[in-house]
Image (cartoon, rainbow, N blue to C red):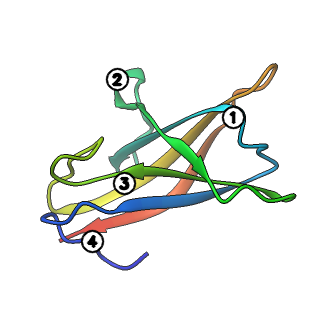
Amino acid sequence: MEPVSSLSRPFVYTTIDGASGSEQVEIAFTNLGSEPMESDWHPAEWANVTAKGARARILIGPGGTVTLLDGTYLMWARVTGARERPVLPCGPVPIT
């Protein structure tokens, strides 16, 4: 992912293979090398649902769902289905 300015307010996306887009989805940001704690999770939403899966998104930055300071964070997605609840590391998000 390209660096995101800490002054901007964009959606960031991650693709979840196999998601129908009807499950509850949450996103967390942690320091690199750390796993999310329960308090790190934030509600996200689905976008671009396809036969292969769906893209989860969350609005970051001032006035968004999550405000991140300068640094590099690991983005995580948690999908709650009828029986499963996977927690997926999604990759680094650099904030400048």
Mark before the other along the chain sequence, 2 or 4: 4
At mark 4, the secondary structure is: loop
Amino acid, disc 4: Val
Amino acid, disc 3: Leu
In which image quadrant can residue 92 be found?
bottom left
77 vs 72: above or below: above
Mark 3 lies on residue: 32
* Residue 86 marker: 1
Mark 4 lies on residue: 4
- Disc 3, disc 2: CB below 8 Å? no
How much space separates mark 1 and mark 2, taking CA atoms?
17 Å
Amino acid, disc 1: Pro
* Residue 77 marker: none
How much space separates mark 1 and mark 3, taking CA atoms?
19 Å
In depth, the one of 72 and 54 nearer the eye is 54
At mark 2, the secondary structure is: helix
Q: Residue furthest right?
A: 51
Neighbours of disc 3 within 10 Å: few (<14), some (14-19), many (20+): some
- Disc 1, disc 3: CB below 8 Å? no
Give the x, y percent position of residue 48.
66, 60
Mark 2 lies on residue: 39
Give the x, y percent position of residue 52.
84, 59
Amino acid, disc 2: Ser
